[in-house]
Image: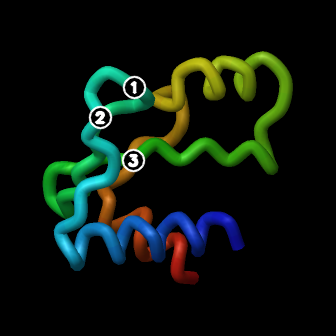
Amino acid sequence: MLMKLLASTLDFICKLGLQVGGSKSRGLSLLEVDREASRAWFCDFTKIRGRLALEMLLDPRKGREMELAELLRTGRS
């Protein structure tokens, strides 16, 4: 359910060409979603526990890298 919500939100942002954030001095700065350039790392915490789960929390790039289009397809199924 959460994956579907994330995929739908990213798809909506991409379709409308929205930018999220933009206040460079606070938070995570500016988020721009581009279907070709954006990358995602999927960290499945329902299957991973212990040290690897902690490492993924600290560095999500330890998860499975995927293109945004793949994330959107995965989230809808």
- Of the numbered discs 1 and 3, the one sitting upstream in the chain is 1
Q: Which residue is mark 3?
A: 40
SS for tag 1? loop
Q: Which residue is mark 2?
A: 23
Horizontal side of 34 relative to 41 (left or right) equals: left
Q: Quadrant of the C terminus?
A: bottom right
The residues bearing labels 2 and 3 have C-alpha atoms spaced at a distance of 22 Å
Q: Amino acid at mark 1?
A: Arg
Frontmost of labels 2 and 3 is 2
The residues bearing labels 1 and 3 have C-alpha atoms spaced at a distance of 23 Å
- Of the numbered discs 2 and 3, the one sitting upstream in the chain is 2
SS for tag 3? strand
Characterize the local packing of mark 3: few (<14), some (14-19) or many (20 or more) Cα atoms within 10 angstroms: some
Give the vertical position of 12 relative to 68 (above or below).
below
Q: Which residue is mark 1?
A: 26
Residue 10: x, y in percent?
39, 66
SS for tag 2? loop
Residue 50: x, y in percent?
84, 23
Q: Residue at position x 41%, y 43% from top?
A: 65
Characterize the local packing of mark 2: few (<14), some (14-19) or many (20 or more) Cα atoms within 10 angstroms: few
The residues bearing labels 2 and 1 have C-alpha atoms spaced at a distance of 6 Å
| Residue located farthest toward the right when viewing the structure as drawn | 50
Give the vertical position of 33 relative to 44 (above or below).
below
Determine the image quadrant of residue 72: bottom left
Q: Amino acid at mark 2?
A: Ser
Q: Which mark is residue 1?
A: none
Determine the image quadrant of residue 71: bottom left
